[in-house]
Image (cartoon, rainbow, N blue to C red):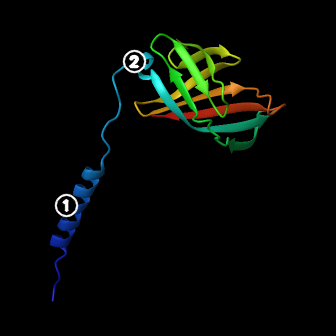
Amino acid sequence: MKTSYTPLILLAILLSVAVLSGCAKADTGTTLPKEQQVVGEWVINRIQLKLFQNGVFVKDTILKATPRPKNFVRFDEDGGFEYKLNINPSDIGTYEFAGAGTLITNSSPKTYNWTMLTLTDKLFTVVNKGSDPAFPGYDVERYQTFTR
């Protein structure tokens, strides 16, 4: 007795195509320029630090979020900037774009110099590199994830 698997294979292929096409994510990209995409309030979702000493990777860590009452970054259309992470008073100032992927904020008491990694309508990731008084003697890469 000869068994034919052709109908079963065709059925499996059809089901796979139906499932995969139904699960495909819609394109959430936008054609707006970055200057318009960043405008609004973003929740600070996660901050990851990578520590280096003499160019050698030593450790990475994720900062604990203790919102009071929430952690956020806000970019106004007119260049206003507000950053609040785990503190009651916000850092308030201005922001500007420098080049294709750099965002510089001037606020009191801190200045943030971010390189943009990802920017969509729901996700914004940046990194800045330098020293951090909490980690003396280390070079720190600070990756931040903002969401809407």
Label 2 amino acid? Pro
Q: Is residue 37 left or right of residue 145?
A: left
Q: Is residue 108 left or right of residue 34?
A: right
Residue at 74% in and 43% down = 59
Residue 76 visible in image = yes
Q: Disc 2 designates what residue?
A: 33
Q: Earlier in the sequence, mark 1 or mark 2?
A: 1
Look at the image and tell me in which quarter the C terminus lies. Answer: top left
Label 2 CA crowd tier, 10 Å (few <14, some 14–19, many 20+) = few
Q: Residue furthest bottom?
A: 1
Label 1 amino acid? Leu
Measured along the vertical axis of the image, is residue 136 above or below residue 15?
Answer: above
User: Where, by quadrant of the figure, is residue 8 drawn?
Assistant: bottom left
Residue 98 visible in image = no
Q: Nearer the viewer, residue 28 or 44?
A: 44
Q: Residue furthest right?
A: 137
Residue 43 is situated, as x and y percent measured from the top left of the image, at: 52, 34
Q: Nearer the viewer, residue 66 or 101?
A: 66
Q: Which mark is residue 14?
A: 1
Q: Residue furthest top?
A: 78
